[in-house]
Each structure stands twice: as structure tokens, then as C-alpha cells.
Amino acid sequence: MNILIIGSGGREHTLTWKLAQSKQCSKLFVAPGNAGTDEIALNVDLSVTDFEGIKALVLEEKIDMVIVGPEAPLVAGIVDFFKADKQLKKIRIVGPDAAGAQLEGSKDFSKDFMMKHGVPTAFSKTFTKDTLEEGKSYIEQNKGPYVLKADGLAAGKGVIITEDAAEAKQSLHEMLAEAKFGDASSKVLIEQFLSGIELSVFVLTDGKNYVILPEAKDYKRIGEADTGLNTGGMGAVSPVPFADEAFLSKVEEQVVKPTLEGLQKEGIHYVGFIFIGLMNQDGEPKVIEYNVRMGDPETQVVFPRIQTDAVRLFKAAADGKLDKVKLKVTPKTAVTSVVVAGGYPEAYKKGDVMDIPEADKDKLIFHAGTAIQGEEVVTNGGRVMALTGMAKTLNAAVKKSQSMARKVKYKGKYYRKDIGQDLLALIQK
Ligand code: AMP
Ligand code: GLY
């Protein structure tokens, strides 16, 4: 089977690495890919939203299945484009259509969806430019912390949390009246603050049947002890020690099932991943957000734990046969540490020559922002690569991941040295 993966990050390198292990996989293409995918697949220099270019590639290379990594092409309707095209409609494509992708593309839509279908979440109110003054009074009438969320896609930056009412009002003003996040902040949700510990649960569905993939915890802030600016993700751990069977079964009953039933009731045929960001509030799951794709760097710990053949898994998802697949997962712990370019998530440099350590079966290297320049691998993005360690214990997996992060060399390298430390402390309590 010829397969195309769309995207260029650590998530896509991980999916490519996993698919490449399948006997059912003949040719693998990644558009646009990075220096890591280039070693195991054919990179094709196409933008993820160049649907015509993707169509030409699919037809030319006789691609049988397309896996969509990031949210942008899904929200822009890549699946609808395939379904509406005579030559493409039979090609398997794993990802939701634009209607389904609203779960991530519009926080207002997803909040309404959760309220309507009884999925536990924080209460919120939505404001627009026309109701800005009401929004400000709402802030004055309620106690902080205030959680302000831009409705649309804002590259992970659209959430502002503050204790200070004046600051909340100022942020609301900037988002609505000054279009701080462009169109994405033409609506803003003010949400009840949830306290607890966060984790994410991933579902793969064929529209009817589903499998729950291993859960993960990520580390979003740039600084140690969760300080500083938000990033795409600086590390991840799977499994999550506090996500015991009782909690995960509440997630399945209270969140996963009503979400999938809700999609069906809305007439949305959803094929692909649902990434459920959750708060564990005294043992009760509350949904913070949905994403319509896998997480990055969560994929770098979730997929190494999955032992089921990835082609079989994705083919079953596209063919409506996930009920035939029983997911096999290693009990080992996976920990990933992301090395980033100096300055990230603000301005950073690209093009620094890299020295990369050897990988082995329990020490995996997933490229993100890398490129090939002549004979050398150079940095080409903010998040440069994810180093995943696998071991029987969390402690040993942390050590493997961190020792590899230490060994990667390029100018200005930075990584968090505390990935997994909070969970180790929790276990030792
Ligand atoms: P989101 O883009 O919705 O994932 O939000 C980004 C981050 O903001 C989340 O990962 C949480 O850490 C935090 N967050 C979002 N919503 C809430 C909330 N209602 N209460 C507390 N923290 C939140
Ligand atoms: N690591 C968070 C995300 O992929 O959205």
C-alpha cells in the first residue's frame, strides 16, 4: 500500500516511523516532511493546504491512503475536497471533514456541542465586538481566575488566564476590538477556571467504532516548573500514573461515548483522531478542549507504545472496521523531551548545523524542525526534535530521554530538564 502523510513535525515523523514498520506498507510519502522523514520516506515539497498539489501527487504515485497530521488542512476542508473529487473519493483519508474539524476550529462550536451532548466541561459565555461591554461587566461580576479563549485557531496562543480583573478586561478589549488574533478572536469565550491536573486522552474512530489510545501528559510552558510562555509542547509522558482504571473508565463513559454519539446525532461522519484535553478535578474528568488530530509531542510517546500494526489500524479506521482491531500496547513508559532553538517560542534562528546521537530500540529520535543542507542536518524550526526514552519505569525512561536530549548538539539548544519530575514526585508520595 502506498501511503501519504501530511505534515512536517515530530508527530508526522513518528507516524511515518510507525507506518514504515508495517509489512503492508510499500511506498511512503511525506508532504512536506523534515530531515527525519527523509531517511525513511520520500519527502515531497508541498504545503499542507495545497490541495491541488496533493491531488496531483496522490494520482501520480497511486497513493491508497492519506493520513493528515495537523489541524490546518482539516479545518480548511481537505477531507471534503477528497470526497467531492471523482478521482479522489475512493482514496482512504484519515481525518475528519470540515464539519467535524470545528471541534477544534471553533471553541464556541465545541462548547455548544459539549453542553448539548452532556459532556462535562467548564461553564462559559461567548462575547463578540457588539457585546464587549457586557463581557467587561461579566468579568466585574465574577471572581477570577479569568480564562479567556479566542474562538478560532490561534496556534496555541489564544488562551489567556489571569487573576486580575483589569487585565482580563484589557485582554478582552484587545481580542475583540483590536482583533489581537485576527479573525480567530472575533468571538471570545470567558470560561470558568478549572483546577486539577491535566492529561490528554486520544481516540481513533471510524465514525461508529473507536479505540482509545494510550493517554499522555504534556509540558506546555517553556520554563521549568511550568513557568514562562506557552509553547507547542516541551515534553510528554505516557502512561500517566494518576490516570488509573477508574478515572479512564469515567472518561470513556462520560466523555468519549457522548462525544461520538453527539457527532452521529449532528450528522457528522467523523473519521480520525479526537484528542481530548482533560482536567482531572478530584477524580472527575472535565474537558478543556478537543483537537481533531494527534498531539505533538504526545504522538512521540503514544505511538511508540502501540504494538498494533499502524497500517492495519488506519485502514480499519478509514474502512469503518475498527471493531475488528484490538489495540495492543506495551506497559513500558515512554518519555519524550523536546529540544528547541534558543529564543523559542519567540524569535529564534534557523540553519544551525546539528550533531545527532545514535538511536536504538528504546532511544528514539523524532525530528521536527530540521532540514538537510548539503550533507548536513540543520535546525529549521522552533521545536527541533523530540527524544523519546522507553523503559520499564518512569524514572528510567526519563533518564534515557534526557540523556539523549543532552547529547544532541547545535548552537543555542534549550530543553526542559524537569520532564516527568512532577509525576515521579506524585508516585513517591
Ligand atoms: P487550550 O488551548 O484550550 O488547550 O488551553 C490552553 C491551556 O490553558 C490548557 O492546556 C490549560 O492548561 C489552560 N486552560 C484552558 N482552559 C482552562 C480552564 N477552563 N481552566 C483552567 N485552565 C485552563
Ligand atoms: N501538545 C499539544 C498539542 O499538540 O496541541
Image (tube, grey):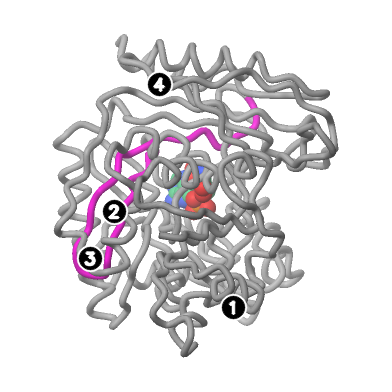
Quarter of the image with the N terminus in it: bottom left
Which is the main secondary structure of the residues drawn in magenta?
strand
In the image, the segment drawn in magenta is 198-223
The answer to whether 418 is drawn above or below residue 87 in the figure is above
- Tag 3, which secondary structure? loop
Mark 4 or 3, nearer chain start:
3
- Tag 2, which secondary structure? helix
Residue type marked 2: Arg
The answer to whether 252 is drawn above or below residue 183 in the figure is above
- Tag 1, which secondary structure? helix
Residue type marked 3: Gly
Residue bearing mark 1 = 131
Spatial CA span between label 4 and label 3: 37 Å
Q: Name which residue lies at 27% across and 57% down.
A: 120
Residue bearing mark 4 = 390
Badge number at residue 312: 2
Q: Position of residue 108 (x, y in %)?
A: 47, 71
Q: Position of residue 122 (x, y in %)?
A: 36, 56
Please identify, in this view, whether the residue under mark 3 or under mark 2 is nearer the observer: 2
